[in-house]
Amino acid sequence: MAPADADPGYVDHPMLTEGVIEARSYQLELADAASDANTLVCLPTGLGKTTVSLLVTAERLQDDFGGKSLMLAPTKPLVEQHAAFYREALDVPDDEVVVFTGEVRPDDRADLWTSARVVIATPQVVENDLVGNRISLRDVVHCTFDECHRATGDYAYTYIAERYLADAADPLVTGMSASPGGDEEEILTVCENLGIEEVEVRTEDDSDVATYTHDTDVEWERIDLPDEVLEIRDSLNEVIEERLAQLKEIGVVNTTQPDVSQKDLNKVHGRLRELIDNDQSEGYQGMSVHAEVMKLRRAVELVETQSVESVRRYFERQRNAANASGASKASQRLVSEPRVKDAMRKAEEFDDLHPKFRRARMLLAETLGIQEGERVIVFTESRDTAEALTDFLGEHFDTERFVGQGDKESSSGMSQKEQQERLDAFRDGEFEVLVSTSVAEEGLDVPEVDLVLFFEPVPTAIRSVQRKGRTGRQAEGRVVVLMAEDTRDEAYFWISRRREQEMEDELRSLKGLADEMEDELVDDQEQLDAFEDSDGADAAGADTDADASATATDADGGGSSGGDGQVGLTDFDVPDPAETGEVDDETDGETESEGTVAEAVPPEEEEAVEVVVDQRELDANVARDLSQRDGVDTRLETLAVGDYVLSDRVAVERKEVDDFLDSLLGGGDRSIFEQVGDLVRHYDRPVMIVEGEKDLYGSRNVHPNAIRGAVASLAVDYGLSLLRTDSESDTADMLEVIAGREQLKRDREVSAHGEKAAKTLDEQQEYVVESIADVGPVTARTLLESLGSVEAVMTADEEELMDVDGVGEVTASRIREVVGSRYDPK
């Protein structure tokens, strides 16, 4: 890639629109490096990380005409912004640069993927499409992870990167971030999760970068709060101290100071959760008090750092919540507490401005008036404050708000289209002041501004770096942070200063250690490759052919024999239907000879099994795990029944131990018997997997026999198979094996809308009686055994019904009401 001969100011490339991409030496060097290996590009905000990615994409698409590029960004506005840039700068038809967000239907995404050259998407959508087997990454020649510092834990970036590196024919990864992490360990984690091999860093100290940056020194302005505001705060703090004293009595906290850190309060929550898990009443009481403390702290934070108007709106929402049906005790206690009521009254009576508002107005007047500036961005953490600031500043300046998409009480969100239109109008100079919540802080190409005003300090280094990048790109800019004296603002000030310094030091250190980190990343990759190459090898030098035969995978779903040559449990053939009382209509009862062990199938001949996954199960890693396995195809559906469907007769409900016990003991939204009833009505072979290493009988203060009785009822009365697994990986293994036995051994189809096989006569009779409200399968059988027929059950009077074991007055009355009432549809 080199500047055009005709115009040395722009990049000349066959895949780029002429005269669009400015030729900056540092971008060209970064792009050249990123074209050769999986690379982390670390560049200060506003200096063109997206351009670097575009240059790499252009090079890769030119080299592979049939390939496509995938760019991932964490938010919808970012996706739209990148798409507009790519359509402008890349020399491909606009309709070949497509956007994937949740607003595009899954079926439409599958069609668009086929014809696209460039796909720009939110990661959650791509994750869903991969798990649902709607798209393939095989032809993707370049994958960009924007704001790649998010690639930790269970965030979708990690899964997508793993799939991409495994599935693509010729993968190349580019990670982009202005702030990749707080320390070397965090950055290495991001690199390892994305398969990064090289690290390229530019700082504002580099001469080729400094040309395009200007000073953005941060000014911290201290604001004194008026006595009326301090009185509201002090009243609330007194209540916080009293509630913390209650928690101290329980033994979950050791301080009553209202400035207790959020980190300590999170620990308190964890200790209370342990008490609840042990069924100790103090845990439930403490959790309610803890909720009240959190609400009070939020009110204090608002009145100190935001505005009296924001705390007034907050109190109003708390009153509404306390008066609503099903209100929590914490909400009810909060609004009835005399000192809180006094604080509410003072907030209502306060008719002056929070001093931050006055200072904000003065700073804007200086910037837009005296200094003849054109644009200002005001950032605030609170939606309420954003609303109040927009109204207040709008009296003096042409002001618009910029908030997220979610609607909140008394505040409507902005659609993706509205957000883009608002930014376009700001860029075009249609208004002067943009008041924004955190939605605009990460990566959005907010236009060059003369002033960035923080209404409060930002305690997170990454967010602060992102925000400051909004100014100082083409001319000297100004960043001002308002800090209320002797409040949480000051704590955030020191946290922010410390973390930003750590970030700056880390970036400089990262630049110096780039070669060393690359060596470490390469070493890690080589070790992984060596491990994979040696996987399954006989360390003792045994006959490898014999060993391979002994460990061959069974075609029914992944079972293997042990290392001692014994046949694995999953290798045994399915039982003869004649012995189990079952005759399979599709096989006419034919089975392999007794005792026959299934022969291993060569890898190239293995058949795949399909697992249908409910959308809600994407919160767990089971579906991701299955989707990455050879021989398993996953499909996403919104299932009415179950979490996984493995055949036309097998559906599986997955529960962790705590969830299982909650629903068993009536603590969930629906009892386990209701859920199992749905499974039984739709599938012949309902299965429940209880996942986790916790003791089923010792996790709650409930007699083990009570749990055994319920489990026995599920098995005997409902015909449910209840299986235990110790982890998500173990659950995935179990699902794969069951799917293999059903689909490969039984040759059964997969039906996401299960329909039970034709019932025997007695099953049909039980089904008719069971369908009456309040009559379960056990009672239905008892009624039929006692009265002899469905007709006798339907014509029996209440006394006859009550003579049957297990039928009380309520059930008998309900049966007569259903059977005897006149049909009168409304």
Image (cartoon, rainbow, N blue to C red):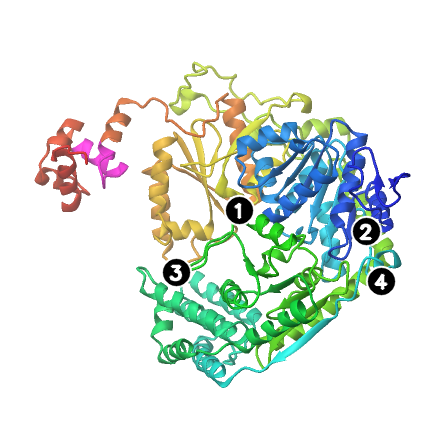
**Element type where label 3 sits in the image:** loop
Q: Where is residue 759, by image quadrant?
A: top left
Magenta-colored segment: predominant secondary structure: helix
Residue that carries the numbered disc 1 in the rendered image: 619
Give left or right: position of 558 versus 534.
left
The amino acid on which the numbered mark 2 sits, given as a three-letter code, is Val
Foreground: disc 2 or disc 4: 4
In contact (CB < 8 Å): disc 3 and disc 2? no
Q: Nearer the viewer, residue 754 or 141?
A: 141
Q: Amino acid at mark 1?
A: Asp
Res. 286 image quadrant: bottom left
Residue that mark 3 sits on: 701
> Which residue is at 51% across, 62% downward?
383
Which sits in the foreground, 565 or 630?
Answer: 630
Marks 3/4: CA distance? 62 Å
Residue 774 is inside the magenta segment: yes
In the image, residue 146 above or below residue 441: above
Residue 686: image location, x then y, percent: 41, 34
Task: Specify the label residue 205 is tagged with.
Answer: 4
Which numbered mark, 3 or 4, is in the foreground of this view?
4
Task: Report the residue marked by disc 2.
Answer: 199
Label located before the other in sequence (2 or 4): 2
The x and y percentages for residue 126 are 61, 39
Q: Nearer the viewer, mark 3 or mark 2?
A: 2
Q: CA distance from mark 2 to mark 4?
A: 17 Å
Residues shaded magenta: 769-786
